[in-house]
Image: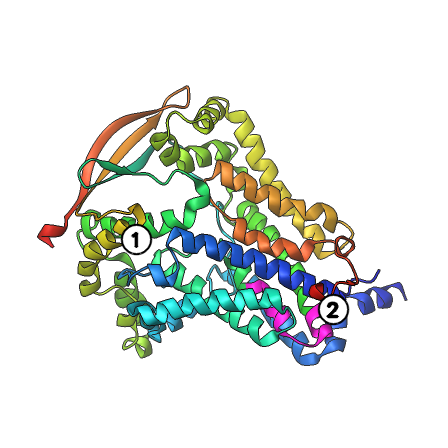
Amino acid sequence: MNYELTTSQRSLLTRMIAGYILFFYLLRLYFGVTPSQLGHPPLFAVEMDITYWIFQGSGMADWLLANPVQSISFDLLLISSGAYVIWKPKQTIAILIFASLIGLYVLLFNSRITHHTHAMCGVVLILWPFAFRNQEYFNRLWEGLRYLTCFIYFMSFYWKAFIGDSFYQFNHGLLSVQGNLAEYIYHNPDTILTGFYQWMIAHPILLNIGNTVIFLLEGMMVLGLFTRKLDHLLFWIPVLVHVAGYFFSDVFFMEMLVLDFTLLPLAWLPKHSHNQLLT
Amino acid sequence: MQRTRIWKNSYWYRTYKTNRLLFVFVVLFFVCSLGSNLIKLETTPFFVWRMYSTKLPETNQYTVQEIWYNQNKLLVVPNTWQEPRKLMIFDPLQLYIHTQKDQKGSYAFRNYLVDDWGQRHPAFQSVLPRLYIQSEEWSRFPDWFLSYLSKQVGEDVKELQVLRKLVQYQQDGSLQVIRTDSVLHINRAAL
C-alpha cells in the first residue's frame, strides 16, 4: 500500500496544522499568557533540561520579556508567520520561522510558569517536516513523526506499567480524580459537573476501571509501530485519552492532539485538488 | 525472501535509501527519545512521558487555595480550557509561597544546583547563577504578581491574601474544610 502524501495532501495538512496551532495561540493571546502580555515575570524554572539552560543562560528569555518592543514584535511575527503559512503552505521559510517562534514560546511559557508542562510538546515537533521543500524528505520525516506519536503514547503506558507502577494501583482513578479535582469541586460546589464528580467519587469502581482502560489504550498505541492498517482506530485513542484527562484530571492537553494529524488515514485527505487555493 | 521484502518495505530502509544523513538524524532522534526516558532525564525536544506514572498517596485529604484580592473578591478560574491562564497565575505564586514562606527562603533547586550538582561539575560553576532565581528576583515577584493579576481581573489589584485550606472528602463526594491557614498577604502600599 502506498503511504506517500501528494503535494496537494501536504498543502492541506500544512494548512490544517498551522491553523490548529494558530487557533490555540490566539486562545493564549486571549488568556493573556503570550510574551506581549506577561510583563517581565521574575520567577522561572529551567529544571535539569539543558535546552532550558541554554535558553535561560543566553539571556534571550529576559531580552524578549523585558521590553514591550521585543515582546509585541514576537507575538506579531509569530501570528503573522502562522497566518502566512495558512495562506501559502509551500513557503518553507515561513514554516521555519513559525516553527522556531512557537518552539521559543514553549520554552518561554514553561520556564515562566515555573513548571515544564507537556501540553505543547506536539506543537514543538510537528512543523519541522514541513520545513523541507523536498517531498521525499518530507514524507520520510512525516512518517517518522507518526512513529514518534505511537511511541509517545506507548511510552506513557510503559512508564505507568514498568517504571512508576501506577498501573497496578487499582484505586489510582479515584485518587487521581480526588486530587486533581479538589480545587474545582471546592470552588464550584453547585455546578452539574461537580454533582457528577461527587457521584463518581461515591462510586469509585467506575473511575478505577475507566482509569485502567485509558492506560491500556495508551499501551495499544504500540500496534502503530508495526502496522498502519489500524490508523483509523488508533487515531481515536489520543482523542479519548485527552478528553478523559480534561474531565477527570482537570488538564487541558488539546494542543498535544496536533500529533494526531500524523495518524490521519491518507484516504481521509483528497489526493488532488482542483481548487488553486488548496494547493 | 519474505524477510528481505519486509526489510525493503520498512521505514528504516526507505529512509536510508532516501538520504543517509536524514536516516542518521531520524535514528539519533529515536535513540535520544528512548534514552531520555530510560535515564529519566528530559532534554527538550526529547521528552520524558512520566505523567501519572507514580502511585498516589492513599488519602482523602487535600489542600486547596483561596486567593482573595482587594479584600473581598475571590479569584476563581473555573474552566479547564483556561488552563494556560491558571498555570501563569497559580504556579509561580505556588513556587513563591512554597519557597519564601513554607521553606523560609530555602530554594530547593538552587541548593541542589550549587551544593550538589555544581560540586560534581566545577567547570559549570560560573554559569549556574544564571539558572536559578536570584534574591532580587524573589523580591520583585509580589509587585509583578499584583500587576499581572490586575490585567487578568481587569481592575487595579492593591491587596492580595492567599488562604490555604485543608479539605477532606466525605462519603458522598463533597468536601469539608478541616483547617484554614493564611499563607501570604501582599499589600501594594507596603511594597
Q: Dot 1, how many residues are within 10 Å of its Cα: few (below 14), some (14-19), or many (20+)?
A: many
Where residue B34 appears, x then y in whole percent?
Answer: 57, 62
Q: Nearer the viewer, residue A188 or B31?
A: A188
Tell me the subunit letter for badge 1: B
Q: Residue at x 54, y 53 (%)?
A: A256
Q: Residue at x 50, y 54 (%)?
A: A24
Quarter location, residue A10: bottom right
What residue did someone put label 1 on? B92
Where residue A33 appears, x then y in whole percent?
Answer: 38, 56
Indicate left or right for A277 with B54 as reference: right
Judge whether residue A138 is colored magenta: yes
Q: Residue at x 22, y 51 (%)?
A: B146
Amino acid type for the residue under numbered disc 2: Thr
Where residue B30 appears, x then y in whole percent?
Answer: 61, 66
Q: Nearer the viewer, residue B108 or A264?
A: A264
Residue B148: tell me if it is visible: yes
Residue A155: tell me if it is visible: no
Amino acid type for the residue under numbered disc 1: Pro
Judge whether residue B87 is colored magenta: no
Where residue A58 appears, x then y in whole percent?
Answer: 35, 76
Quarter location, residue B33: bottom right
Magenta region, mostly helix, strand or loop? helix
Residue at the outermost left position: B190
Indicate left or right for A3 with A110 as reference: right
Q: Quadrant of the N terminus of chain A?
A: bottom right
Magenta span of residues: A125-139
Residue at the outermost front position: A276
Q: Nearer the viewer, mark 2 or mark 1?
A: 2
What residue did someone put label 2 on? A7
